[in-house]
């Protein structure tokens, strides 16, 4: 059975452009409840570790530089079928291919600066949530 939590980050392009509140509104309107949330600046080491699965990809250096260029908002979200439903809400990685009404279609500027992160599996949602939050920072 699909799990009911996912992890997201509002990325530097979106926080810098003042889209944080609008994106949080869309997340809540879509039926997700917030279990943890914080505004934070990622260090280079944190960004490298978070995206280590992409370390062999040609865009890894650009991705790490981008993710440390301004603050992010990290959050743990709860809803039935959270991982899949959140991926549907954010849309395709490349905003040019994202469906109308998705967060990336509305707010992303490029395939790199694509406004939001969403976990791709229940296992990664747990790993990513624990990467950013101590258990005492997560509500029941
Ligand atoms: P996802 O965020 O939709 O799961 P992934 O393939 O996991 O997409 O890639 C992680 C992140 O790396 C993307 O959200 C985006 O910021 C960046 N990225 C992915 N592909 C490219 C690319 O071709 N050029 C530059 N950045 C990319
Ligand atoms: Mg991914």
Image (cartoon, rainbow, N blue to C red):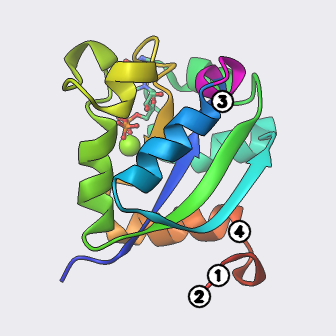
Q: Secondary structure at mark 3?
A: helix
Question: Dot 2: few (<14), some (14–19), or many (≥20) neighbours within 10 Å?
Answer: few
Some atom of ligand 2 lies within 8 Å of the CB belonging to the residue at label 2: no
User: Which badge, 2 or 4, comes first in the chain's sequence?
Assistant: 4
Mark 4 lies on residue: 133
Name the residue nearer the viewer: 57 or 107: 107
Which mark is first along the chain, 2 or 3?
Answer: 3
Which residue is at a point 22% across and 76% down the rendered structure image?
2
Q: Secondary structure at mark 4?
A: loop
**Closer to the camera: disc 4 or disc 1?**
1
- Mark 3–mark 4 distance (CA, rounded to whole Å): 18 Å
The reply to whether discs 3 and 4 touch (Cβ–Cβ < 8 Å) is: no
Circle 1/circle 2 CB separation < 8 Å: yes
User: Percent x, y for residue 16?
Assistant: 71, 20
Q: In the rendered image, which quarter contains the C terminus? A: bottom right
Q: Alpha-carbon distance for marks 2 and 4?
A: 13 Å
Q: Which one is closest to the eye, mark 3 or mark 1?
A: 1
118 to 130, vertically: above or below:
above
Q: Which residues make up the magenta segment?
A: 13-18
Q: Find residue 64 and report its image quarter.
A: top right
Q: Quadrant of ligand 2?
A: top left
Prevailing SS of the magenta stretch: helix
Which residue is identified by label 1? 139
What residue sits right under mark 3 in the picture? 67
Q: Residue tagged by mark 2?
A: 140
Q: CA distance from mark 4 to mark 1?
A: 11 Å
Measured Cα–Cα span from mark 3 to mark 1: 26 Å
Q: Are marks 3 and 2 in contact (CB under 8 Å)?
A: no
């Amino acid at each position: 059975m699909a799990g009911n939590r996912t992890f997201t980050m509002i990325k530097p392009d979106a926080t810098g452009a003042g889209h944080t509140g609008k994106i949080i509104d869309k997340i809540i309107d879509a039926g997700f409840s917030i279990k943890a949330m914080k505004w934070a600046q990622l260090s280079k080491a944190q960004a490298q570790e978070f995206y280590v699965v992409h370390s062999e990809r040609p865009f890894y250096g650009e991705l790490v530089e981008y993710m440390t260029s301004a603050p992010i908002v990290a959050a743990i979200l709860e809803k039935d079928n959270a991982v899949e439903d959140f991926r549907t809400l954010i849309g395709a990685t490349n905003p040019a291919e994202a469906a109308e009404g998705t967060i990336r279609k509305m707010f992303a500027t490029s395939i790199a600066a694509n406004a939001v992160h969403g976990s791709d599996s229940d296992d990664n949602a747990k790993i990513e949530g624990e990467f950013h939050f101590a258990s005492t920072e997560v509500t029941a």
